[in-house]
Image: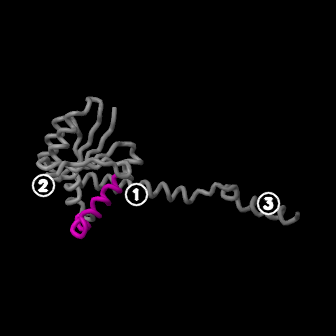
Amino acid sequence: MADFLVVDGYNILHAWDSLKKMMAEDMEHARVKLINILANYQAVKGIKVIVVFDAHLVKGGAGSKEEITGVEVIYTMEGETADMLIERFVGHLGEDDRVVVATSDWAQQRIVFGKGAVRLSARELEKEIAAFEKEVQNHFEILNDYDPKLRGHLSDNIRELLEKIRRQK
């Protein structure tokens, strides 16, 4: 059994305000930012993240697949949309595999839902990742506050007493 999050990359880039603005200036930078966000999410959640980007309008495009910081990144081939690739992927999974498809494309959501996958809109994914980032930040703040040294576990009275003993030597 495996857990997958399959992301329609350009759909998410166009839906999230922060990435939409970035995409208007530098599309590659926006793609890398999304991949990094998803890589952090994958690392903590323990799921396999796959991001699919449309390249169906690229003349002669053979498509490509690579792994970037643990995230599988797929560019479709000429004539193949991200929707088509995602539908095929979901259709080939075993019945014990759990798949969440992140897209705001209503037609795509209905198709993958019919094949047994769970759908997550772009806005829902954005909220889930924001909550996850806040949870991670809170966890690190707690760790930063933790003092593993003995002095962090002693009352002020005991510390003063030990300091007096230390100075008498």
Range drawn in magenta: 20-38
Assign a secondary structure to mark 1. helix
Marks 1 and 2 in Cβ contact (< 8 Å) = no
Name the amino acid, label 3.
Answer: Leu
The residue nearer to you, when weighing 166 against 17, is 17
Q: Which residue is mark 3?
A: 162
The residue nearer to you, when weighing 35 against 133, is 35
Q: Which residue is mark 1?
A: 134
Residue 105, labelled with which disc?
none
The residue nearer to you, when weighing 6 against 45, is 6
Q: Earlier in the sequence, mark 1 or mark 2?
A: 2
Q: Is residue 15 a member of the stretch shown in magenta?
A: no
Which quadrant is home to the C terminus?
bottom right
Residue 59, labelled with which disc?
2
Looking at this view, name the residue that lies furthest to the front.
60
Residue 126 lies in what quarter of the image? Answer: bottom left
Q: Disc 3 and disc 1: Cα gap in Å? A: 40 Å
Q: Is residue 29 a member of the stretch shown in magenta?
A: yes
Name the amino acid, label 2.
Answer: Lys
Q: Earlier in the sequence, mark 3 or mark 1?
A: 1
Q: Disc 1 and disc 2: Cα gap in Å? A: 42 Å
Looking at this view, name the residue that lies furthest to the top.
95
- Could you tell whether 32 is left or right of 134 in the image? left
Q: Disc 3 and disc 2: Cα gap in Å? A: 76 Å
